[in-house]
Amino acid sequence: MKFDPGSFRDPAGRVLHADGRVFRAVFDAGSVPYEQARAAGVFGKAVERGRLIGLTEREPEASPAMAGAPRYLLEHPRIDFVSYPYEWTFSALKAAALLHLDLHLELLEDGFTLSDATAYNVQFEGTKPVFIDHLSIVRYEEGALWTGQRQFAMQFLNPLLLWAKCGLAPNAWYRGSGEGLAPEDMTRLLRARDKLSFTVLAHVVAPSYVHRRGVSRGLEGKRAAAARLSKEGLVAILQGLRSYIQKLRPPAQKTIWADYAGHNSYDEERRSAKHGFVARAVAAAEPRLLFDLGCNSGDFSRTALDHGARSVVGFDFDFGALERAYARFDQDGGRMLPLWLDATNPSPSQGWAGAERKSLAARADADALLALAVIHHLAIAKNVPLDMAVDWLMSLAPVGVIEFPSKSDPMVRELLRGRADIFPDYGEEAFLAHVKERGAITDQCRLGEDGRLLVAYDRRR
């Protein structure tokens, strides 16, 4: 067993991995809270409601990763793909916030609470959020403050406000800070009318003022220690936040590629041929997890799910397209999670010791890849050499499909418009040669007489 590098801050327990399985070691510091929650049946209720990931107790064993055997050893179902809040869409972050609040409210009914409010305790199965940290569930003590209030504001409320009220996606900022958006920063960005909301006043404006004043006078810790909050008061705070967040909407703005699925260079015959090629490739691979790079609104993710993919993680740079994909699969229940990705600047390894949050490459254990209408954006729009673009794409999964549009393609001509053609090596012959250097071409198809080329590769051959 090996410790997960992102699980070290809680002395109550740590997450471990072994042979593709996921475990949680519960140490002495977490044994009593765990036993209390188990005896009260709160784990079972939350799992049954779909709020909490499942758990099965295993016989504790000593491991080289630990000084000795833990008090308890739990096994959890493996999440398809571990994602981070700075990769989520507005709708995903909102769904995660509502899950956190709903779980907290239900726990309070049984005399328990959450010890923190980090968004990293939420993961997704398709578009459905699920809470993963059982040891954050502890006995509620009457009069205790909500210790996670500031953390909830930084990691849930403030990023949503930046999106909904300022029209700015928080992802790059969130990734840069790691811990979210501080109230002291958020107050500088909100308009005066946005601050008139009681929720914003209570969770952003007032805490920002108290924090600044407390830090300057050294009083913040003393005041917090003396404060008390009834359970009824805490419930009212959580319910008020839930009502406010439920009403938040992403900004209604036109994005570049949101309508690409319906407005592109394909006619119906070519679109049908493309779906057919993807369907055959996916059916042959039978992937547990498939990456759909440049997923747009999810048309080909849907085809992949219909032809043998157990789950799909879609990546795109366009938030409008991602929101449409999220709404689509949230409605039909397909196991597809749309995530934000700048392919030329993917999520790096970061956090403590540069390993607390894993890079995309470190999490890329997909069984198959779709890279449709992507490579020309890398090679021409972003000046990535063609061989490097092919190398990166094929590194994401052992088998997959890559679509190559030539310079005569309308979309490529649009990318070249108004700039010098400095891409003499961008061509079909070079593309095929680069693929063959890294694996076998198992199938290919041209969409129309002079259309785009679809190539199925197998890196293992």
Image (cartoon, rainbow, N blue to C red):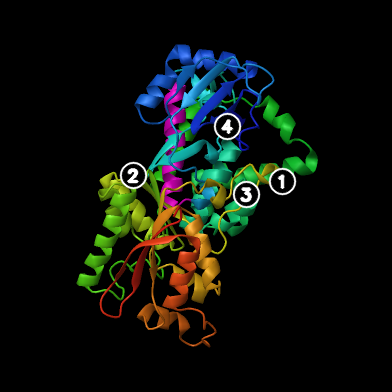
Disc 2 marks which amino acid? Arg
- Bin the neighbour count of mark 1 within 10 Å (Cα to Cα): few under 14, some 14-19, many 20 and up: some
Q: Which residue is mark 4?
A: 116
Can residue 196 be seen in this snapshot? no
Q: Earlier in the sequence, mark 4 or mark 1?
A: 4
Report the number of discs. Answer: 4
Q: Magenta part of the protein: which range?
A: 88-109
Q: Measure the alpha-carbon separation of dots 2 and 1.
A: 44 Å
Q: Earlier in the sequence, mark 4 or mark 2?
A: 4
Callout 3: SS: loop
Q: Earlier in the sequence, mark 2 or mark 3?
A: 2
Q: Which residue is mark 1?
A: 212
> Where residue 349 is drawn, which disc sits there?
3
Q: Quadrant of the N terminus?
A: top right
Q: Which residue is mark 2?
A: 335
Q: Measure the alpha-carbon separation of dots 1 and 3.
A: 32 Å
Callout 4: SS: loop
Disc 1 marks which amino acid? Arg
107 in magenta:
yes
Callout 2: SS: loop
